[in-house]
């Protein structure tokens, strides 16, 4: 009996070992955040994307369909300048969206941590936003809630901003001073037209709520829409980065494991039958 | 005791069934997706073949003789008093037989053919993501055998000194599954020639070296065939050339000199961890120039 148990144990271990090499085929590596640049390509007549900064040679870009396939939580997008309408739905939680002097863009995401609407841009964002930064004469519509809204003046203070949801904190400033800070705008109440706040004073507060922690400081200058630093990081492997062209053995390993299991089951039943013959009681 | 054995036996049977279903399901899925991919490629090959047939028909002696007969007949009807120089017809630029494929997917950089082998595939080039087509077929659908991919550091226009093409080593022989047959010199003798159709031209190659190598650690200071793309100096060229000749499993008798260009086919091999089986071919010429079609 003891030897039989040993055999069964060995077979089980063998099955596990057979399966083990295939396990790596199921592993998912922790992907680095990727920045995608979007631009209207005139000769293609459509918006296209490029991983990392947009190539000055206007090459290496492809259809937005593929962007929807590959984008994931934590990625960043930059809408490059252009006056062509863009309406893009990305069912992920984005790290950031930058409207880089873009003419007429609507981005829908589950949520976005940082939105930068640079000067001359006309933008709309669907989905909750944690930090929204709007510069100079930009026009921005936020169709859900915004936690912190930073209105920054560099050349002019003529931003037009509407928020359909609530806004927890609003700060208007330039590089040298903070003009005002407001709190807790009711849903659908925040509206500023060409730098002038149009919201009824009864719908927000000028004093911070008791439990409010200071909002994060925001850079007073417009962030450059340089995406090169946020391009995908190189593989962390100690080996050179060369495409892996081997075939997966997982299906064959699974079939072998099935054979081992059926063999073990057969041996167990056969041993049981032998014991019953030797000792009928 | 009897019950515990019976229970264990049932567990093994259930486990076996799970493995069988999972393994069989995966194999079936791979089979179906690969068949779908192959159907797409077959359509593209048929299209290319029809272009070739059209060109052959246009160049056939019958059509030429008809033209000359017409040319001879014409003077009889409208005799000219003085002999004139008949202008030679300007040869029409050749049509690229793979133009439909190039138009169908702009990620396609070339079409690779090794005559009398299964290697007859599009070569995809995606500089933004080298591995995009590693597990995708020509149309971007998931595929276990993927597509042949041109290394992102290689380029066909302008053409780099070395074009490295990676392909899966499939047990079915598809893609570069049969590439390791080059380890036999007799196989090499029968399959020396390779053809690469780019958008602009047809390039021919002859095999110069066949060797086993591997992907090395980043810190390893050794010859890495997969890091040679451009030779701007004699020294850079010689380093690559000397190494591939030294590593070659047999002497092909083919030589090269600074200025020559190479085509390197690479696939996984299992002689060591991260092994690679590599066939290097030297460009022998540009057999045809194609008219622009975009």
Image: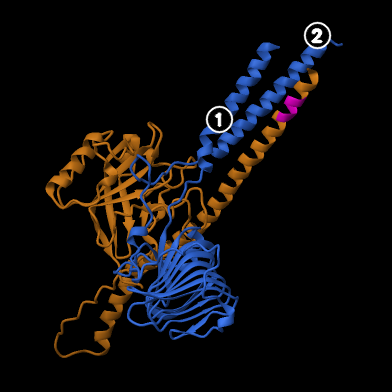
Q: Is residue A133 left or right of residue A129?
A: left
Name the N-terminal-most of marks 2 and 1: 1
Q: Nearer the viewer, residue A48 or B65?
A: A48
Q: Nearer the viewer, residue B41 or B264?
A: B264
Question: Does the magenta-highlighted stretch encompass residue B10?
Answer: yes
Question: Does the magenta-highlighted stretch encompass residue A125?
Answer: no
Picture coordinates of residue B181, whole percent (x, y)? 38, 38
Question: Which residue is pictured at 38% across the width and 31% down the height?
Answer: B271
Residue B176 - label: none
Q: Which of the 4 image quadrants contains residue A137?
A: bottom left
User: Residues at badges 2 and 1 in contact (C-beta under 8 Å)?
Assistant: no
In this rendering, the answer to whether B55 lies above or below B190 is below
In this rendering, the answer to whether B159 lies above or below A256 is below
To the question of a shared chain for discs 2 and 1, the answer is: yes
Per the model, the C-alpha gap separating discs 2 and 1 is 35 Å
Numbered disc 2: secondary structure:
helix
Q: What's the chain of the residue with tag 2?
A: A
Residue carrying label 2: A278
In this rendering, the answer to whether A227 lies above or below A44 is above
Q: What's the chain of the residue with tag 1?
A: A
Picture coordinates of residue B245, whole percent (x, y)? 22, 38
Picture coordinates of residue B285, whole percent (x, y)? 23, 56
- Give the magenta-colored segment's residue range: B7-11
Q: Colour of chain B?
A: orange
Question: Which residue is pictured at 52% across the width and 85% down the height?
Answer: A198
Name the quarter where the N terminus of chain A is drawn: top right
Residue carrying label 1: A18
């Amino acid at each position: 009996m003891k030897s039989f148990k040993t055999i069964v144990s060995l077979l089980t271990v063998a099955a596990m070992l057979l399966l083990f090499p295939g396990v790596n085929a199921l592993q998912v590596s922790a992907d680095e955040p990727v920045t995608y640049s979007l631009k209207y390509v005139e000769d293609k007549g459509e918006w296209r994307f490029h991983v990392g900064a947009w190539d000055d040679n206007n090459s290496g870009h492809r259809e937005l369909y593929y962007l929807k396939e590959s984008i994931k939580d934590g990625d960043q997008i930059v809408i490059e300048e252009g006056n062509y309408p863009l309406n893009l739905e990305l069912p992920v939680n984005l790290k950031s969206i930058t409207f880089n002097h873009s003419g007429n863009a609507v981005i829908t995401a589950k949520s976005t941590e940082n939105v930068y609407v640079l000067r001359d841009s006309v933008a709309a964002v669907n989905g909750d936003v944690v930090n929204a930064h709007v510069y100079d004469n930009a026009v921005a519509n936020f169709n859900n809630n915004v936690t912190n809204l930073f209105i920054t003046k560099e050349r002019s203070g003529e931003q037009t901003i509407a928020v359909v949801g609530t806004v927890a904190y609003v700060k208007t400033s330039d590089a040298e001073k903070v003009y005002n800070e407001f709190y807790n705008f009711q849903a659908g109440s925040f509206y500023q037209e060409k730098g002038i706040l149009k919201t009824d004073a009864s719908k927000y507060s000028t004093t911070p709520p008791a439990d409010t922690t200071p909002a994060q400081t925001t850079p007073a200058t417009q962030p450059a829409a340089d995406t090169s630093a946020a391009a995908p990081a190189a593989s962390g492997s100690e080996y050179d980065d060369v495409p892996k062209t081997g075939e997966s053995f997982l299906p064959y390993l699974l079939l072998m494991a099935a054979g081992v299991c059926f063999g073990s089951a057969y041996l167990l039943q056969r041993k049981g039958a032998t014991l019953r013959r030797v000792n009928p009681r | 005791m009897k019950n515990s054995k019976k229970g264990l036996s049932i567990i093994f049977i259930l486990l076996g069934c799970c493995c069988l279903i999972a393994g069989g399901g995966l194999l079936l899925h791979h089979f179906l997706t690969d068949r779908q991919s192959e159907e797409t490629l077959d359509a593209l090959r048929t299209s290319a073949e029809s272009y070739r047939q059209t060109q052959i028909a246009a160049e056939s002696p019958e059509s030429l003789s008809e033209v000359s007969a017409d040319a001879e007949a014409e003077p009889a009807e409208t005799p000219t008093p003085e002999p004139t120089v008949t202008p030679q017809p300007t040869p029409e630029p050749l049509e690229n037989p793979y133009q439909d494929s190039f138009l169908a997917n702009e990620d396609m950089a070339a079409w690779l053919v090794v005559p009398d082998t299964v290697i007859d595939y599009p070569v995809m080039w995606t500089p933004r993501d080298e591995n995009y087509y590693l597990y995708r077929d020509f149309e971007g659908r998931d595929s276990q055998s993927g597509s042949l991919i041109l290394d992102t550091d290689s380029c066909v226009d302008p053409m780099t000194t070395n074009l490295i093409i990676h392909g899966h080593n499939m047990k079915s022989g598809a893609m570069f599954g049969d590439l390791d047959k080059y380890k036999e010199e007799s196989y090499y003798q029968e399959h020396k020639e390779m053809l690469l159709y780019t958008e602009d031209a047809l390039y021919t190659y002859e095999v110069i070296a066949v060797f086993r190598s591997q992907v090395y650690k980043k810190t390893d200071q050794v010859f890495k065939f997969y890091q040679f793309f451009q030779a701007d100096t004699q020294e850079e060229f010689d380093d690559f050339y000397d190494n591939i000749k030294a590593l070659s499993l047999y002497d092909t008798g083919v030589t090269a000199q600074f200025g020559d260009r190479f085509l390197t086919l690479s696939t996984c091999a299992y002689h060591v961890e991260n092994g690679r089986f590599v066939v290097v071919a030297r460009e022998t010429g540009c057999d045809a120039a194609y008219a622009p079609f975009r």
